[in-house]
Amino acid sequence: MWKMSSLIVAGCFGPVGLLAAQNAPRSADLRGTWELVSIRDLKTGTVTPAPRTEWMQFTRTHFSVTAMSPGRRTVTPAQYDSLSSEERIKVDYSRVFDDKGNQVFAARAGTWRLVGSQLHQTASMAIFAPIIGIDRSLKITTLSKTRLMVQAPSFTSPDLTTEMTYRRID
């Protein structure tokens, strides 16, 4: 009798386990380049278009994120060469921060691993140095051939959790 009960239970729960396994994100599906499309504040539900151009790239073991806000100041090499040392420092600063101290360029890179639906990223280099060596966990809510959605707390405000939507660009 216990064999029959086991078969009935396995028959009931077997397909559920199979479906769950099929829906789990796969490392191979992340590889490539993803562009940020929108950000949703999970507390308010407000969705905003990407405020910057941001690309997230995955190889088999490493990731990189590069982001740039519109309106970033540019200086030609000839202009830069004609500047004083003090002016060059200001121009160099403006490549990362605007006049109000807002970051206009960001970059980080390191290793990544997938544990279930949790994407763990550990930066080994970053403009925002406090995240170097920190295991940052992002929850993958959607992963298809063309779309990636992840939820993560803000770097600077852990109480703020957002859902970022990316589209594959490669």
Image (spheres, rainbow, N blue to C red):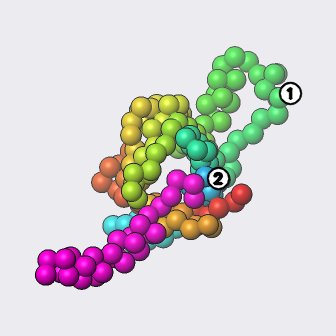
- Say what secondary structure mark 1 lies in: helix
Q: Amino acid at mark 1?
A: Ala
For image coordinates 68% across by 45% down, the residue present is: 72
Between 98 and 110, the one lying in front of the other is: 110
Q: Dot 1, crowdedness within 10 Å: few (<14), some or many (≥20)?
A: few
State the image quarter where residue 88 is shown. top right
Q: Is residue 26 left or right of residue 13?
A: right
For image coordinates 47% across by 61% down, the residue present is: 25
For image coordinates 57% across by 58% down, the residue present is: 29
State the image coordinates of residue 57 (x, y, percent, origin top left): 61, 48
Q: Which residue is mark 2?
A: 32
Q: Amino acid at mark 2?
A: Gly
**How would you classify the magenta stretch by its main secondary structure?**
helix
Q: Which-is-in-front pick, marks 2 and 1?
A: 2
Q: Confirm whether residue 101 shows in the render.
A: no
For image coordinates 51% across by 38% down, the residue present is: 111
Q: Which stretch is magenta?
A: 1-29
| Quadrant including the C terminus | bottom right
Q: In whole angstroms, how far apart are the C-alphas of marks 2 and 1?
A: 36 Å
State the image coordinates of residue 68 (x, y, percent, origin top left): 63, 47
Q: Dot 2, crowdedness within 10 Å: few (<14), some or many (≥20)?
A: some
Between 58 and 81, the one lying in front of the other is: 58
In the rendered image, the vertical position of residue 100 relative to residue 163, given as above or below: above
Q: Is residue 4 left or right of residue 65?
A: left
| Quadrant including the N terminus | bottom left
State the image coordinates of residue 19 (x, y, percent, origin top left): 41, 74
Q: Which mark is residue 78?
A: 1
In the rendered image, the vertical position of residue 41 relative to residue 114, given as above or below: below
